[in-house]
């Protein structure tokens, strides 16, 4: 969902692209894992969890202005790191600049992870609320009497006689 939002795509277009990758190369299965999420209306939908390689393989295939912007940013960062590795422009200022860029990318990723955790916690609260509601419905249908002799619970359904 985050990739769809970031690149201005519809969620089903992203999942279709991942399915296509999974069907086109055997190594793709190392990058993507099928999962599900529940949307705001309570519908369960498919989604994929991916590693960094999967992210790169997927997004490098995208088209459009946002995808092109991302590709140029990636190329610029890659070229900059290559220059540093080669030692052509290896100075303390450049190391700091590289660290600033890396710090920005990590903070952006952390922010996305935190949003994902918040959505997960929200869903956890919804599930707990739904389970509580189900429990309350069940207990309203059952009468529970403790048997003190052997400390078991004896469940008696309404409108049924005890023999």
Image (spheres, grey):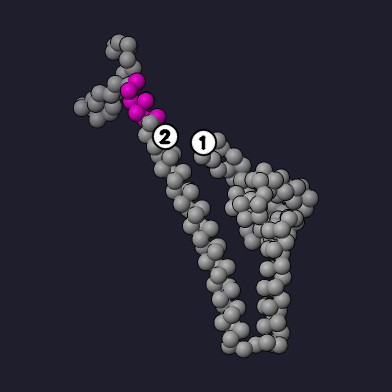
- Residue 8 magenta-drawn? no
- Rendering quarter of residue 65: bottom right
Horizontally, is 132 left or right of 107 in the view? Answer: left
- Rendering quarter of residue 127: top left
Local crowd at mark 2 within 10 Å, few (<14), some, or many (≥20)? Answer: few
Q: Residue at x 70, y 82 (%)?
A: 83
**Residue 12, placed above or below residue 97:** above
Which is in the foreground here, disc 2 or disc 1?
Answer: 1
Which mark, residue 28?
Answer: none
Q: Residue at x 52, y 58 (%)?
A: 113
Q: Residue at x 59, y 83 (%)?
A: 95
Residue ID for mark 1: 42
Residue furthest out toward the front: 65
Pinpoint residue 86: horizontal percent, then vertical percent.
Answer: 71, 85
Instruction: Report the front residue among 102 and 155.
Output: 102
Q: CA distance from mark 2 to mark 1?
A: 11 Å
Horizontally, is 65 left or right of 37 in the view? Answer: right
Q: Which residues are magenta?
A: 134-141
- Residue 139 magenta-drawn? yes
Residue ID for mark 2: 130
Q: Residue at x 34, y 28 (%)?
A: 136
Q: Secondary structure at mark 2?
A: helix
Horizontally, is 133 left or right of 101 in the view? Answer: left
**Residue 65, placed above or below residue 106:** above
- Rendering quarter of residue 102: bottom right
Instruction: Report the front residue among 154 and 119.
Output: 119
Pinpoint residue 160: horizontal percent, then vertical percent.
Answer: 32, 11
Pinpoint residue 75: horizontal percent, then vertical percent.
Answer: 72, 70
**Residue 72, placed above or below residue 45:** below
């Amino acid at each position: 969902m985050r990739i769809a939002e970031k690149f201005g795509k519809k969620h089903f277009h992203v999942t279709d692209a991942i399915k296509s990758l999974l069907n086109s190369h055997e190594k793709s299965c190392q990058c993507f894992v099928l999962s599900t999420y529940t949307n705001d209306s309570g519908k369960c939908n498919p989604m994929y969890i991916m590693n960094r390689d999967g992210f790169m393989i997927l997004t490098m295939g995208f088209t459009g202005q946002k995808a092109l912007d991302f590709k140029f940013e990636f190329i610029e960062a890659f070229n900059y790191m290559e220059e540093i590795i080669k030692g052509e422009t290896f100075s303390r200022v450049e190391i700091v600049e590289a660290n600033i860029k890396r710090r920005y990318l990590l903070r952006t990723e952390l922010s996305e992870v935190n949003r994902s955790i918040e959505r997960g916690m929200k869903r956890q609260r919804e599930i707990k609320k739904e389970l509580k509601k189900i429990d309350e419905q069940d207990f309203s249908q059952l009468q529970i009497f403790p048997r003190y002799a052997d400390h078991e619970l004896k469940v008696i359904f309404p409108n049924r006689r005890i023999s």
